[in-house]
Amino acid sequence: MPPENIKLGKFKASRIIVKESWNALKQDKEVMWFPVISGFFTLLIIGAMASFFYFNLLGGSRTEFKIDESKEITNLVLYGTLFVYYIVIFFIVNFFQSALFIIVQGRFSGQDLNFSDGINGASKHIGKIFIWSFISATVGIVLKIISENFKVVGRIIAGVLGAAWDILTYFSLPALVIGNLNVKDSFKESAAIIKKTWGETLIVNFGVGLFFVVVIVLAVLLSLAIIIFSPTTYTFIIVGVIFAVFYIAMMLLSTTLSSIFKLALFNYARTGTIPQGFSDDIFKQAIK
């Protein structure tokens, strides 16, 4: 067993997290479909909302509103539309992430759940997921209003408050679905875990992202090198398409592995038990 005072470098910790989360993913490959489906529906909603905005609020023109009333009413319509968009997007993302949590939690508990089990399990918590999405959307729209109406100071305040909110609620969704808590208690649980894991854990928790940033940067450099050495239109198109597909795949994989490790850390913070397949060096560093 590694010593209690083990100190890992940021990228080494990130690499270990990715490797061990990947091993967990290989046991339940179907969970990869959840971020894919979530992304698909998100794109559909973005397209639908953009069409609604363009044809109903702009009247098919990029320069003229169909609303002739006061600026306050115009802003009300705009923020109202954005608020609905936030609710729908948050709900889609939270619902499918909850389904992923349920399957992975089953694996941690020695069960072998399938895709339908994840969907059915998330459906049992659909009311709480919607309430949490509504709260998240409310916070998002308030921060948007602050950012847009108080200029530079507003953007700074919104940025700080937004970051604080994201950190404090980092474990709220697994607390809702896996911990089976209500919305109020899930916030308290998340804040308590963050307090327990403050410091190195922020690096550890977001370590998956660090690993994939390095991978994508290397892919960008390789793509540029190929284009420089073969500067043709066909090369540019082929490299561009391959890179776009690679980037999307990496983002989906990063999202999935981040969710798996978040759940593993959530379990350890609550029970003190390290999920099977994860080594204790990361967790001993994360939980102080």
Image: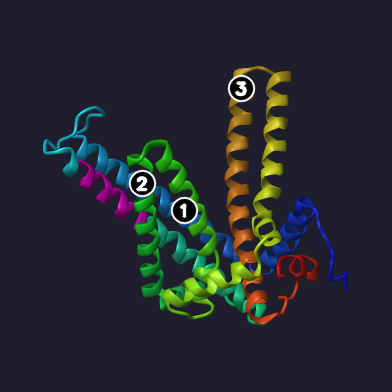
Q: Secondary structure at mark 3?
A: helix
Which amino acid type corresponds to the residue marked 3 in the rendered image? Tyr
Between marks 3 and 1 in the image, the one whose residue lies nearer the viewer: 1
Q: CA distance from mark 2 to mark 3?
A: 46 Å
Could you tell me if residue 245 is visible in this image? yes
The span shown in magenta is: 74-87
Q: Is tag 2's residue or tag 3's residue first in the polypeptide sequence?
A: 2
Q: Which mark is residue 161?
A: 1
Q: Secondary structure at mark 2?
A: helix
Q: Quadrant of residue 70?
A: top left
Q: Secondary structure at mark 1?
A: helix
| In the displayed structure image, the side of residue 20 where residue 98 appears, left or right | left
* 10 to 213, vertically: above or below: below
Q: Residues within 10 Å of mark 1 (few under 14, many from 20)?
A: some
Dot 2 corresponds to which residue?
146
Could you tell me if residue 56 is visible in this image? no
**Foreground residue among 37 and 167:** 167
Q: Residue at x 68, y 49 (%)?
A: 210
Image coordinates for residue 46, horizontal then vertical, percent: 37, 46
Image coordinates for residue 114, horizontal then vertical, percent: 56, 74
* 142 to 1, vertically: above or below: above
Q: Is tag 1's residue or tag 2's residue first in the polypeptide sequence?
A: 2
Q: Are marks 1 and 2 in contact (CB under 8 Å)?
A: yes
Which amino acid type corresponds to the residue marked 2 in the rendered image? Ile
Quadrant location, the N terminus? bottom right
Image coordinates for residue 220, horizontal then vertical, percent: 67, 33
Between marks 2 and 3 in the image, the one whose residue lies nearer the viewer: 2
Q: Is 84 in the magenta?
A: yes
Q: CA distance from mark 3 to mark 1?
A: 46 Å
Q: Residues within 10 Å of mark 3 (few under 14, many from 20)?
A: few
Dot 3 corresponds to which residue?
234
